[in-house]
Amino acid sequence: MKESVMSYTPKRTVKGDVITMAHGSGGKAMRDLIEDVVLGAFYNPELAQLEDQARIDLAELVAQGNRLAMTTDSYVVDPIEFPGGDIGTLAVNGTVNDIAMSGAKPLYLSCGLIIEEGLEIDTLRRILLNMRKAADQAGVQIVTGDTKVVNRGKADKLFINTTGVGVIPEGADISASRAQPGDKVIVNGYVGDHGAVILNARGDLMLEVELETDCQPLNGLVECMREVCPDIHCLRDASRGGVATVLNEFAESSGVAIRLQEADIPVRNEVRGVCEILGLDPLHFANEGKLVAIVPADKAGTVVEAMRQHPAGQGSAIIGEVESGPAGRVTLQTGLGGGRILDMLIGEQLPRIC
Amino acid sequence: MKESVMSYTPKRTVKGDVITMAHGSGGKAMRDLIEDVVLGAFYNPELAQLEDQARIDLAELVAQGNRLAMTTDSYVVDPIEFPGGDIGTLAVNGTVNDIAMSGAKPLYLSCGLIIEEGLEIDTLRRILLNMRKAADQAGVQIVTGDTKVVNRGKADKLFINTTGVGVIPEGADISASRAQPGDKVIVNGYVGDHGAVILNARGDLMLEVELETDCQPLNGLVECMREVCPDIHCLRDASRGGVATVLNEFAESSGVAIRLQEADIPVRNEVRGVCEILGLDPLHFANEGKLVAIVPADKAGTVVEAMRQHPAGQGSAIIGEVESGPAGRVTLQTGLGGGRILDMLIGEQLPRIC
């Protein structure tokens, strides 16, 4: 893919410094924007045809598995650039991860841009180049796209939708409804980083913390996990709503209870600090590179060991286990032997986190 | 699919009349919104699992063709409801049509909602139900989705992204680059209706015209066309930028010229009226149920005849032909024997038309 980047040298046809309504009208100005800025970042032979739809060889897909996974996410994060990432890296990794959580190999993404009139073209170039980097890192291609521009004040700088498809290998049977009593709960590292970074980046907290988003692709990590444990029961990335919400969904869908050991959950001191100031729980904070897995107890040690060998899983840990009931209940066992019920996120704690 | 609708009776769990930030936070309020309003409209067994990704049997896809078509579009039309349709019907038909223009059978859609805080929940219900109706009419299923809410003033009521996949049957080789000298240019009826309706619905024109959007699915019509002419050369729906922009894209990609006969292009008097007032060209007006086809000359009559038998093609007509050059030029032959060059849309003539 690096060669194909080299083979496309976009003409700098876009004039001016900011996006205008003309860039969204379907005419010449839009075509210039697409050929210069969008293809300049995303170039690959499929996209370069500028057809209204990408065409993907089905035989190649079938060679990799028996089911197509398809997922969509719109990204509206505020601010659009923040320590360690931006809305573009988020839009690629978030959708790659949603695909990967079915055990699938993510392959192709679409990219739908809604741009507010007045966005700086340099900002757009920077974000799209970061999307391309993230796509290369995750091993996916952006094969089809769409660009809309809305008047100033009718959107907030930039919203991005990515929709992804991938192929699920035969034998993968991962579902929120498969948690069984005795199973172990695993996370792949520190929880809550992304949520804390975004809250801090908005400037309301005025904290001097050295935090970066955990935004990263998880498909490679999931492949490692499946190699040592093909029968992963449940798998979800803990984005909006955090680890607590994912576990509540598992407990509800599977009709089981889940008990976490608070002391075993990796949380950075900086994140804990942000949480204490705001009276929030890091288990409700969004992550963009963290997964929650439920696996059979006899495989849990092996899975964690394999995960720790992968760059995206160095901080992996077993944080709890599945119990027979009460169905749908998630409990946090605290240090002093007590426990408290850990509910789904209710209300509007963290708007526009992703 | 009608049976499955009957089998789901959503609990009316959503409280209040309007969307609040809590409906987008990934927690309980969002889950209520999805189970009540979204599943209430879109219910099908795949979506009802509420997994983060849909899973589609690849064997079923391979049985229908050899390539997957994938396309994406974000819809930002203003106003969101207008005579003959709304942003939801547009979001389904627009993406269905982009898939169909490759000759593919559209099968599955994703739906990404970006909702502005304060949108009436009844409006959202109405629009999603219309999306369901449009999906049923086009024979596609909405299998995965995402919902985001942004603060008041940070979006404009509702934006919808739909991404579609379909299967291209073996033998279809439709491309913007295949127009050949001698080929005929066909449209399936009156052009410019959608653009005129939206301009009028914004209330700036104060015209008393009886116009409705032409928004409709075109996949059935394309199937009819392919039955009598498997070798369609070029096919595109004339949405943003209108018929003129599509023809300029064909002429440029194929390195040919195209000459249209103005007298043969079907335009309603009401649309002509709107255009005359504004000094605009109906060939630059957006359509949401109109395609432009380029077919071999010896098949053109048969194709038009077949199209006229289909509800979406009753007004079909041959409107011009392909010439060897100058490459990229589109000319409109006027009644008096003169001709004028018909360029792509330049500038911001019709913002937020789709």
Image (cartoon, coloured by chain):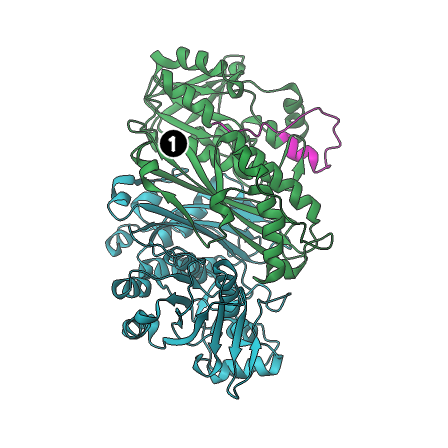
Chain colours: A cyan, B green
Is A199 drawn above or below residue B262 in the view shown? below
Q: Residue furthest bottom?
A: A336
Mark 1 chain: B
Q: Main secondary structure of the magenta part?
A: loop
Left or right of residue B310, residue B40 in this image: right
Residue B41 appears in the figure: yes
Q: Dot 1: what SS?
A: loop
Task: Identify the residue at horizontal 41%, vertical 37% (top origin).
Answer: A52
Residue B77 appears in the figure: no
- Amino acid carrying mark 1 in the image: Ala
Left or right of residue A335, residue B233 in this image: left
* Label 1 environment density (alpha carbons within 10 Å; few <14, some 14–19, many ≥20): many
Residue A328, position as x, y percentages in the image: 54, 64
Residue on which disc 1 sits:
B104
Residue A34 shown in magenta: no
Question: Observer-nearest residue: B17 or B4?
Answer: B4
Residue B203 shown in magenta: yes
Question: Observer-nearest residue: A159 or A236?
Answer: A236
Please provide the residue range marked out in magenta. B196-218
Quadrant of residue A204 in the image? Answer: bottom right
Quarter of the picture containing the C terminus of chain B is top right
Question: Observer-nearest residue: A135 or B238?
Answer: A135
